[in-house]
Image (cartoon, coloured by chain):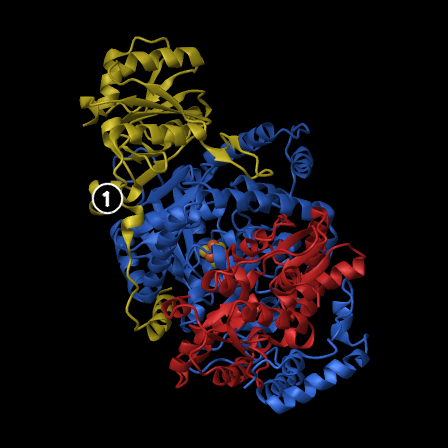
Chain colours: A red, B blue, C yellow
Amino acid sequence: MTHAQASGRPRTVYFFGTCIVDLFYPGAGLAGIKLLQSAGVEVVFPDGQSCCGQPAYNSGYLDQARAVAWAQIKLFAKDYPVVVPSGSCAGMMKTHYPGLFRGRPEQAEVEDFVARVYELTQFLVDVLDLELDDLGPPVKVTWHPSCHSMREMGVADQPKRLLHQLSKVELVELPRERECCGFGGTFSVRQPEISAAMVTDKIGAIAGTGADLVLSGDCGCLMNIGGAIEKAGGHARPLHIAEFLWERTHGRR
Amino acid sequence: MAAADFRAKAHDALGNRELRANFRRAMDGLMSKRAMLFADRTEWTALRALGAAVRARSLLRLPELLEQLETRLRDNGIQVHWAETVDDGNAIFKDILSRHGARRVVKGKSMVSEEMGLNHALEAEGIEVIEADLGEYIIQLDHETPSHIIMPAIHKNKQQIARLFSQKIKDAEYTEDVDRLTDLARRVLRRKFAAADAGISGVNAAVAETGTLVLVENEGNGRMCTTVPRLHIAVMGLEKVVERLEEVPPILSLLTRSATGQVITTYVNMISGPRKPGEKDGPEEVHLVILDNGRSRIYADPELRNTLRCIRCGACMNHCPVYTRVGGHSYPGVYPGPIGKILTPQILGLETTGDLPHASSLCNACVEVCPVEIPIASLLVRLRSEGAGKTPHGGAPVKGAGSRRKSQEDWVWRAWALVFRMPLLNRLSNFALTRFGWALPSDSPLLREWMTVRSRPRFARRSLHELVRREGIPHE
Amino acid sequence: MSDARTAILGRLRAAEGKTPPPAEHFEVVAPRGWSGEEKIARLRRLMESVHTEFLDARGGDWTALLQDWLAQQGLAGLIYPPDTPLGRRLAGQWSGATPLIPYDRSLAEWKEEFFAQEAAGLTGTQGGIAETGTLILWTDETQPRTLSLVPPVHVALLDVNMLYDTLWQAMREQGWTNAMPTNLLLVSGPSKTADIEQTLAYGVHGPKRLLVVLVEGDPAFS
Ligand code: SF4
């Protein structure tokens, strides 16, 4: 947080799209970029970017994770904040990059990069103090905070503060909201039964809220939760918070 | 038990509705009780930092402190024994007990003794060992093992306990009244305490500067075991030592609040010696068995060493979404939950337990609550690396390192790294997946697992890279 | 087994860390600056929340109050430590209906009888801790360990002038490191368990009831 606050409201930011957004939820990424632009910030999207390295890291393949991480860091060399529409990928950078490069020649550069990393809603609230005007019809939503956004990035109530600004949006608290949805990357296929039990409980809780939409800041969770709701024939539609905010404030395009 | 068993046992546990309800109810209660006691975030942060520092300092000087502890204990009249393996530990117990002709033994809760399989070893010698902690007593009656390190019988509900007592305790009527069930156990066990030749206990912390064994408990059974019989034998893992007495208060406070949401347990029992001349009670002999069983190997690696900070509070399992669903009996070894996932593979070796570190979504719920700041998630990742034979430079390999290595997986990650490191390759693969990803067969093993309860993920028709270019967003 | 010792310590020493030890900041367990009344109120509230009973004998005669209390409970006797100042005081002034039973022999000599007594056990305390609602019990030749453990009721005398804010404060100000007794006990209520369905039940192995008698400035305790 210190970086952007120290230098005031930044004019330009980098956007790190993440691999899941890139391939499955590009609309969420684009909405994130547009929210930033509409707040008067110039957004740069380094074209060579791909993935934060988390899949390999979580599997214990640290050399491969490091190689991919370093390839990203080099692309984000200027002194701009790096905004990430995913608590998990931002968390990978913030909490695991320093350890991956400790004692290596790249260490200083990595630490400089890490200090500039923000999760999207954190940046919108803490740095830009974004104000929103609700243009949409009344709707009931619930919020799924991702594990890594809370526990690695320290995202607290920023997403809810954004949602509370929307006058026609009713936010229903999700029971046991802090409990993992069961995604966990390879966990979902390495321990499919436990993961299934977790996501089944999660979508049960979501159904219990009666919400029309389940919002999150992480597309891994959305893929897991959304896939399970779809298979079960549930009601709530999964949506990334960036996409939701953009739709509500600028109309569907 | 091999790791394949974890999946099989987890499968059974997931299908057992009564069991899942028992765990869910208990864990919900424990989480909310703990949360209330750490509501003051500033205090929590400071206390936790102190607890972590105390444990880290103790480990830093472990060999020195163990020697100091041994000297002080001897000065105080407590005899010290060292055991490299569980068999050695059991042999020491048998030897001491047989020298005293002890046939009837009462025992307080001790996870290290579970690790040793002490009860079986002693019973094989014809020694009667009675577990005196109520939870341990319950599972001993049912020939089970603990399903939780603090609350061993947490998997049972009171109907199950009522049935068990009425079947196993002489002249006991069937009752589901918790007070009456407790009273039943009291009556049986009081006779055992009075008649016991020896008492066995664990240790929550051993203080090097004073030669003191600190034990916490609520029931008084631990005090009975360490006070009433003529002989007391305590056992601890070698990591339990702290340097100074003043380091005990933060550890106690973190332990009891994290474990059961209590500001303190009913009893804190500080033992600094056997009965002195003129004293009217207390054991005439006190022994301490210090167990290694793989711990010195864990100690050899500066990262893995953090495992040994653990104060066995159980908070990590109380907050674990996996533990809550599969229960403590699904895990190999005696330590379930997140601490078990990092400790058991290091003790038993990755050959048989290498899949255990993968049985985590890395959600970090355990990391968030661990009162001594053990980076459990990072250690799980380290053990995953170890399984694939990738001990980091300067690290000490875990037992069984490399035993889970699959060359196929190595190739997958190498190819992955290539694609995600090379923008051109990444662009090509994105193009292919967005255009033709639908053609991947649904019966590939990974997709099949995914699709048991989820629909098939759908690739976007255009990647974010393409949308960014189309929208004219600066993409240097 | 000294081989095991050498081998274990050798392995540990080979790996011992060279990094500087992390600093410890004890402020969080240090005294809170509570007044005497705040300490009493806090200790009472916490101990009562776990079923401890209180008898306030400040400014009165604790032996008389205790006598009445015991008579109401219908207990078979009061087992007490005869060779302590409080034991002597008690024996000198006792006129109650409840018989006094001195703990004047070794446990082995009367184990069966002692375990079977439906009596109360009386002990002094070495003060209390307000933060956690805790009594400090020092055991020695005159005050046996089992007196606060085996009888179904434990009566503890607590001088309110000996209350500490925290455990850390108590152990430092009383100089525990210099002279630990063979068994130092912290007692924060009657024996309890939650091993059956997380339901609290009292009196599982130790005392079912704990009565704290508050006294002030009694010379028997200085
Ligand atoms: S790992 Fe941490 S949370 Fe888990 S039992 Fe040990 S100290 Fe408690």
Residue in the picture at 62% in, 83% down: B413
Q: Dot 1: within a 10 Å radius of its alpha carbon, few (fewer than 14), some, or many (20 or more) residues? A: some
Residue B36 image offset from top left, x and y in percent:
47, 42
User: Can residue B396 be seen here?
Assistant: yes
Chain letter, disc 1 residue: C
Q: On the image, numbered disc 1 is attached to which residue?
A: C176
Q: Is mark 1 within 8 Å of ligand 1?
A: no
User: Can residue A193 be seen here?
Assistant: no
Q: How many marks?
A: 1
Q: Nearer the viewer, residue C136 or A183?
A: A183
Residue A237 image offset from top left, x and y in percent:
73, 59
Residue B471 image offset from top left, x and y in percent:
64, 79
Residue C132 falls left or right of residue A17? left
Vertical placement of residue B80 versus B150, above or below? below
User: Where does the N terminus of chain B fall, quadrant-wise?
Assistant: bottom right
Vertical placement of residue B436 versus B382, above or below? below
Q: Secondary structure at mark 1?
A: helix
Residue in the picture at 72% in, 62% down: A226
